[in-house]
Image (cartoon, grey):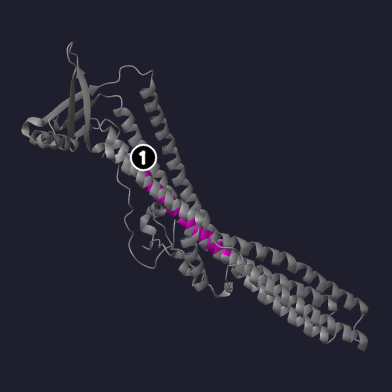
C-alpha cells in the first residue's frame, strides 16, 4: 500500500505543476472617452447602491426593498448566478486527480475433468483497491476552461446587478407615475367640484336676473368637460397600480400603497463632473467585459486542444483467493502505473473549426464591449441633458401656474364688478387647470430624469467617499 500512496502523491503533485499556456493574453480593448469625461472634473462623489433614498420618500424606500426581495425576474437572475457557480465547479474538477475506490468479491465453482471421477472446486476471491487518474494540463486547456467558467460567473453576477438596477428604477418610476396620476386626479376632481359650485351660483344668478342662459350653458359645458377628463386619468392610475403590483411581486388587490405628493419629494442633483471610471459601475459594461474575458479563455482552451495530452493513471490495493483472513497480507498487494500520450492527427477539421469559432466569438464580443461602453457614455450624457432640461421646464411650469392663478383671481373679481365678461372667467379657469396639471407632469418628468441619471450610471451617488475597486478588472486570465 505504501507504493500506491507514493504513486498517488506523485499524481497529486503533478496536478499543481504549471504548464505552458498557449492561448492569448487578455487585454482590455481601448475605448475612446469623450473629452468632457475626465476624472479631474469630477467632485469625487461615487455611486451608492441605495440611490432611491435620495428622493426622501419612505413609501418609495419600502416599495423598492419589497421589489428587490420578491420580484421573480430578480430571483431568476440570482438562480442564474448559482447555475454559473455550479458550472465553474465542474470546470475546475479536471485540475485535480480523480480517485475512486473499488471493492469486489465472488465465489466460483468449477469442475475438473476426470475420466474416472469428476472433481469439483469452489474458489472465493476478494479484491479491495483504489484507482487514480490525472491529465497533465501541460498547455493550459483545463485552466483556461476554468478561467472561462469563472468569468461567466462574474458575467451572471453583473447580469443580476443589471436586473437589480433596472428593477429599482422601474419600481421608482412606476411609483412616481402613480403619485402623478393621483395628484392629477385630485386636481381634476377639485376643478370639477369648483365648476359645479360655480354652475350652481350662475343658475342662482340667472333666477335673480344677474346672469344669462348663455352663461349657464357655458358653465355647464365646462363642468361636463371636466367630468369627461376624469375617467382617462382613473384608467391610467389603475394601470399604473397594476404595473407596480407586478414589479413588487404581488397582486393589485394585495398592494397596500398610499401615494405621496410629488411636491414632498427631493429632486437629487447629480455631480457637476463625471469621471470615466463611473462606467465601471454599469453592470452591462462589466458584463460585456466579463463575457469578453470568458471568450478569450475559450480561445486559449481551443488552442490547447490542438496539442498532445498526457494522462497518468494508477491502480493498487489488495486481492486474494485464499479468504478474507489473507486479504491484507503483503503478498496480496497489487499496483500498477500507466502513462498515456494522445495527440490529434486527423479529425476532419473539428478542432481547427472550434478554434476559428472561438476566435470569431471573441472578436464579436470585442465589438459588443465597444458598443456597450459607447452606449454608456451616450446614456449618461442624454440622462444629464434630460435632468437639466426637465429642471428648467419645471421652473417655467411653476411660474405659469402662479401666473394663471393670479389671472383667474383677477378675472373673477372683474366679472363680479361687471368689468369683464364671463368668457374671460371660463378661459382663466381652464388655464389654471391646464397649468396645474402640466406642472404635476413636469415635476414627474424632473424626478424621472433623476432616475434616468441613476440608471445610466449603474446606481446613484453618495455625498462623499472615494471610488471603490471594481472586481474582475484584471488584465486577463493569462496575464
Residue receiving disc 1: 294
Q: Is residue 175 above or below residue 138?
A: below
Q: Quadrant of residue 422?
A: bottom right
Q: Quadrant of residue 365?
A: top left
Point out the residue furthest to the left here.
Answer: 330
Point out the residue furthest to the front here.
Answer: 116
Q: Is residue 7 above or below residue 82?
A: above
Q: Quadrant of the C terminus?
A: top left
Q: Which residues are magenta?
A: 151-174
Give how far across and how far down residue 407 sits, in percent.
73, 78
How many marks the image carries: the answer is 1
Q: Main secondary structure of the magenta part?
A: helix
The residue that appears at 84% across and 83% down in the rendered structure is: 200
Give the camera-side residue of 94 and 154: 94
Give how far across and how far down residue 152 sits, in percent.
37, 43
- Left or right: 51 as drawn, with respect to 87: right
Is residue 385 part of the magenta span, yes or no?
no
The residue that appears at 41% across and 47% down in the rendered structure is: 287
Give how far across and how far down residue 468 sits, in percent.
33, 58
Give how far across and how far down residue 251 sits, in percent.
59, 63
Q: Quadrant of the N terminus?
A: top left
Look at the image and tell me whether residue 81 can be seen: yes
Amino acid at each position: 500500500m505504501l507504493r500506491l500512496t507514493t504513486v498517488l502523491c506523485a499524481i497529486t503533485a503533478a496536478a499543481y505543476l504549471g504548464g505552458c499556456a498557449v492561448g492569448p493574453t487578455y487585454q482590455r480593448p481601448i475605448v475612446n472617452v469623450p473629452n468632457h469625461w475626465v476624472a479631474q472634473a469630477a467632485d469625487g462623489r461615487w455611486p451608492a447602491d441605495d440611490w432611491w433614498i435620495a428622493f426622501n420618500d419612505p413609501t418609495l424606500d419600502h416599495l423598492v426593498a419589497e421589489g428587490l426581495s420578491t420580484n421573480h425576474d430578480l430571483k431568476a437572475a440570482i438562480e442564474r448566478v448559482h447555475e454559473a457557480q455550479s458550472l465553474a465547479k465542474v470546470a475546475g474538477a479536471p485540475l485535480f486527480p480523480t480517485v475512486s475506490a473499488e471493492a469486489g468479491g465472488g465465489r466460483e465453482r468449477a469442475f475438473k475433468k476426470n475420466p474416472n471421477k469428476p472433481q469439483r472446486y469452489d474458489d472465493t476471491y476478494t479484491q479491495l483497491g483504489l484507482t487514480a487518474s490525472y491529465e497533465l494540463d501541460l498547455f493550459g486547456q483545463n485552466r483556461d476552461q476554468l478561467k472561462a467558467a469563472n468569468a461567466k460567473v462574474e458575467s451572471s453576477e453583473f447580469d443580476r446587478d443589471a436586473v437589480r438596477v433596472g428593477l429599482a428604477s422601474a419600481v421608482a418610476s412606476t411609483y412616481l407615475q402613480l403619485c402623478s396620476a393621483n395628484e392629477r386626479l385630485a386636481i381634476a376632481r377639485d376643478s370639477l367640484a369648483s365648476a359645479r359650485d360655480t354652475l350652481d351660483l350662475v343658475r342662482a344668478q340667472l333666477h335673480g336676473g344677474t346672469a344669462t342662459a348663455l352663461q349657464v350653458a357655458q358653465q355647464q359645458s365646462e363642468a361636463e368637460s371636466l367630468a369627461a377628463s376624469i375617467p382617462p386619468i382613473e384608467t391610467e392610475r389603475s394601470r399604473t397600480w397594476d404595473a407596480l403590483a407586478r414589479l413588487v411581486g404581488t397582486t393589485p388587490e394585495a398592494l397596500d400603497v398610499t401615494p405621496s405628493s410629488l411636491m414632498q419629494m427631493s429632486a437629487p442633483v447629480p455631480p457637476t463632473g463625471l469621471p470615466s471610471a463611473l462606467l465601471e459601475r454599469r453592470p452591462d459594461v462589466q458584463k460585456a467585459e466579463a463575457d469578453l474575458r470568458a471568450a478569450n479563455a475559450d480561445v486559449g482552451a481551443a488552442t490547447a486542444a490542438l496539442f498532445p495530452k498526457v494522462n497518468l493513471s494508477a491502480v493498487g490495493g489488495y486481492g486474494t483467493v485464499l479468504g478474507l483472513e489473507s486479504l491484507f497480507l503483503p503478498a496480496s498487494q497489487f499496483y500498477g502505473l500507466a502513462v498515456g500520450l494522445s495527440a490529434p492527427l486527423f479529425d476532419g477539421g473539428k478542432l481547427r473549426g472550434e478554434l476559428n469559432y472561438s476566435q470569431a466569438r471573441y472578436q464579436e464580443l470585442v465589438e459588443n464591449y465597444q458598443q456597450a461602453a459607447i452606449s454608456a457614455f451616450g446614456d449618461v450624457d442624454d440622462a444629464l441633458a434630460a435632468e437639466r432640461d426637465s429642471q428648467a421646464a419645471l421652473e417655467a411650469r411653476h411660474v405659469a401656474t402662479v401666473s394663471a392663478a393670479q389671472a383667474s383671481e383677477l378675472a373673477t373679481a372683474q366679472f363680479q364688478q361687471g368689468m369683464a365678461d364671463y368668457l374671460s372667467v371660463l378661459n382663466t379657469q381652464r388655464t389654471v387647470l391646464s397649468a396645474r396639471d402640466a406642472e404635476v407632469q413636469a415635476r414627474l418628468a424632473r424626478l424621472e430624469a433623476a432616475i434616468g441619471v441613476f440608471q445610466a450610471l449603474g446606481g446613484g451617488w453618495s455625498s462623499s467617499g472615494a471610488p471603490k475597486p471594481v472586481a474582475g478588472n484584471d488584465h486577463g486570465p493569462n496575464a
